[in-house]
Image (spheres, rainbow, N blue to C red):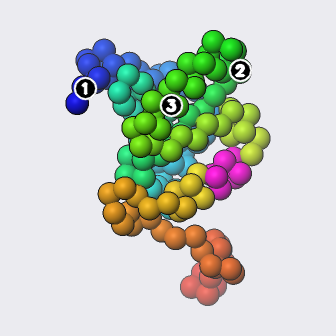
């Protein structure tokens, strides 16, 4: 197996995690870093092969990419397609969201991520991910213990 984690790739990933993260990446990271949704552990700006993934859950083989307006460019779109094809060949499910999806419909984005995480088993066996709540068992803030 070829390793792509050269010192320069690792340094670039670290820079992307710290000073070069976009505001949209920071918004989504605030949710993913808390192991929401479904208790999944995500990494951000994680090197994989020749690419640095915006967000990845290695256990579930789920990659999440956030795309700004530059991704509508024909050349960039071709690059994104090759990148997605590579990741799929590596066994990843790839979710791509436009930045304005995150800023304008964060709950919808999180619901898609949750549905993807809970719709297929992890290739490494039981993942310990929390199941979707049954009807009437959604998140509540007012419990008898709080009263």
Q: Secondary structure at mark 3?
A: helix
N-terminal of the pair, mark 2 or mark 1, is: 1
Q: Residue at x 53, y 62 (%)?
A: 118
Compare residues 106 and 73 and report the one nearer the observer. 73
Q: Is residue 81 left or right of residue 55?
A: right
Can you say which quadrant of the picture contains the C terminus?
Answer: bottom right
- Residues in magenta, as a range: 106-112
Can you say which quadrant of the picture contains the N terminus?
Answer: top left
Tell me the number on the disc at residue 39.
none
Magenta region includes residue 110 = yes
Q: How many marks?
A: 3
Q: Is residue 10 left or right of residue 80?
A: left
Figure quadrant of residue 47? top left
Alpha carbon separation for disc pair 3 and 2:
18 Å
Alpha carbon separation for disc pair 3 and 1:
18 Å
Compare residues 24 and 48 and report the one nearer the observer. 48
Q: Mark 3, residues whose alpha carbon is within 10 Å: few (<14), some, or many (≥20)?
A: some
Tell me the number on the disc at residue 85.
3
Q: Secondary structure at mark 1?
A: loop
In the picture of the structure, the residue carrying the numbered disc 1 is 3
Magenta span main SS:
helix
In the picture of the structure, the residue carrying the numbered disc 2 is 72
Q: Residue at x 63, y 71 (%)?
A: 139
Please provide percent x and percent y for residue 3: 25, 26
Please provide percent x and percent y for residue 11: 33, 19
């Amino acid at each position: 197996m070829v390793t792509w984690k050269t010192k320069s790739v690792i340094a670039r990933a670290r820079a992307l995690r710290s000073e070069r993260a976009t505001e949209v990446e920071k918004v989504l990271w605030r949710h993913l870093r808390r192991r929401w949704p479904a208790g999944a552990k995500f990494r951000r700006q994680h090197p994989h092969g020749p690419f640095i993934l915006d967000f990845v859950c290695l256990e579930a083989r789920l990659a999440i990419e956030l795309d700004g307006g530059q991704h509508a460019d024909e050349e960039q779109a071709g690059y994104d397609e090759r990148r997605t094809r590579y990741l799929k060949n590596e066994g990843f499910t790839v979710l791509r969201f436009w930045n304005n999806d995150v800023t304008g419909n964060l709950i919808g984005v999180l619901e898609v991520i949750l549905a993807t995480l809970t719709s297929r088993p992890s290739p490494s066996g039981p993942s310990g991910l929390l199941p979707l709540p049954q009807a009437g068992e959604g998140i509540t803030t007012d419990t008898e213990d709080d009263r």
